[in-house]
Image (tube, coloured by chain):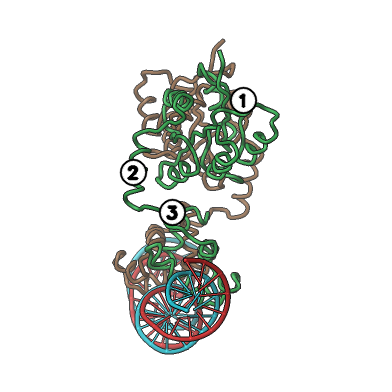
Chain colours: A green, B brown, C red, D cyan
Amino acid sequence: MHKHPVFVVDDHTLLSQAIAQMVNTFENFNVVTTCKNGNDLMQKITSKEIPNPEVILMDVNMPIMNGIEATEWLSKHHPEIKVLALSVEDDDSSILRMIKAGAVGYLLKDSEKSVLEKALNETIKNGYYHTKEVANLLVRSLTKEESSIQLKEKEITFLKLACTELTYKEIADRMCLSPKTIDGYRDNLFTKLDVKNRVGLVIYAIKNKIYTP
Amino acid sequence: MHKHPVFVVDDHTLLSQAIAQMVNTFENFNVVTTCKNGNDLMQKITSKEIPNPEVILMDVNMPIMNGIEATEWLSKHHPEIKVLALSVEDDDSSILRMIKAGAVGYLLKDSEKSVLEKALNETIKNGYYHTKEVANLLVRSLTKEESSIQLKEKEITFLKLACTELTYKEIADRMCLSPKTIDGYRDNLFTKLDVKNRVGLVIYAIKNKIYTP
DNA sequence: TTAGAAATAGGGGTTTTTCCCCTTTTAAAA
DNA sequence: TTTTAAAAGGGGAAAAACCCCTATTTCTAA
């Protein structure tokens, strides 16, 4: 019987190997290879040395090229490959971003083995796998916030620098802008992000992975 | 041939199941059970319904009762059980704390399958498994800093509040102290932690897991 | 036992940074 | 051509940072 080819993408070698071994015990699936990050995956897909997978089990958080970027690339260049997100994160923004990037399902790492098998089978059969939890989340996100806050490139640069011990004056120097312009960015972000002071900016940046300590 | 009984402790069910399955393919080992956290482990050990393991593969970060607490408990009540820490964290403090708690080895989740097998075998044979990396780290921690900065209870309370949008005046209120005393704490921490301003305090607190955003 | 650290608590005051409300200029977009 | 946006800036108030100072208490070592 034909086994559906699967890739496992996770920066933690031991985990990707273990997951791969587990998937190989499933009747209908066969792990062709594991990848350490998005870049690694891109290379393996483009090199054509190994057959492309039907499904990719993709970790969200990876160094170099994360799951979201990798999924975006796949949606663009290989829309026929289904991406199943596999993550420890159950926070709304991670799930939303993966779904937006084109993932056909979202699976938490504290699921049962049987759930993984079911998710893989449903992805092959229906083209997607969605739990009630993710469905509920999507409804919530659409009704409550519409679209999450969109930051401009310079605002992100500023936000990253605001997470250091530099004074605003020094940040202005770094960004080659007048301190008064920085004043504007700051005040603008205060209202936009609904925070009161610089500590608020720092916490926001870290929560939203704009800055990683 | 006798197989050494192993427990796998990790809050991510899928990962602990996958790791367990992998360990079961090793010649000399047999996973008796998996646990979702330290509490779960404690119950299984004390209930005596299943034979105690020789080795426990222990995740560091878990809700309810983390790997460090669980290892401390084991060192106290079942020193004959060897704990191998298995973590994504490669930061110094996590490793140090696990070793101090009584772990006989530290393994990163991005190791190879063969490394895990080797670590398990060496733990049985020698009673420990230490890589050069961990050894180097321990030497560094002893020579460089002696003991990492020791914060007092009140300093920690202050530091946590400094990570919020509260002003120092409000922090003083919360701690039932004069703003001037808070001034003292702040200035003291500036020199102690070698930071220049409040952002420095926030970043320090987050890096050292005193505050979690 | 007593002098002297060391930790805790606080006072007063100066300088710098931060914050908030404004306006103007310039450039791009509709 | 009007509208929008980014960039730059003025004035002023509040907050934070940094300075030097004193008075307890507690512990410790001469």
Kindly indicate whether the residue at mark 2 contacts the one at mark 3 (C-beta within 8 angstroms). Answer: no
Q: CA distance from mark 1 to mark 2?
A: 36 Å
Q: Secondary structure at mark 2?
A: helix
Dot 1 falls on which chain? A
Label 2 marks a residue whose chain is A
Q: Are marks 3 and 2 on the same chain?
A: no
Label 3 marks which chain's residue? B
Choose top left, top right, bottom left or bottom right for residue A47: top right
Give the x, y percent position of residue A182: 51, 73
Q: Residue at x 60, y 70 (%)?
A: A174
State the residue position of label 2: A139
Q: Nearer the viewer, mark 1 or mark 2?
A: 2
The residue at which mark 3 appears reads as B210
Spot occupied by residue A134 in the image (x, y as percentages of width and height):
38, 38
Question: Are the residues tagged 1 and 3 within 8 Å (C-beta)?
Answer: no
Q: Residue at x 32, y 68 (%)?
A: B170
Secondary structure category for the residue under label 3: loop
Mark positioned earlier in the residue sequence (1 or 2): 1
- Name the residue carrying label 1: A32
Of circles 3 and 2, the one toward us is 2
Question: At 35% across and 73% down in the image, what residue appears?
Answer: B179
Name the residue type under label 3.
Ile
A157, C29: nearer the viewer: C29
Quadrant position of the N terminus of chain B in the picture: top right
Q: Is residue B8 visible?
A: no
**Given the image, on which type of amino acid does mark 1 rest?**
Val
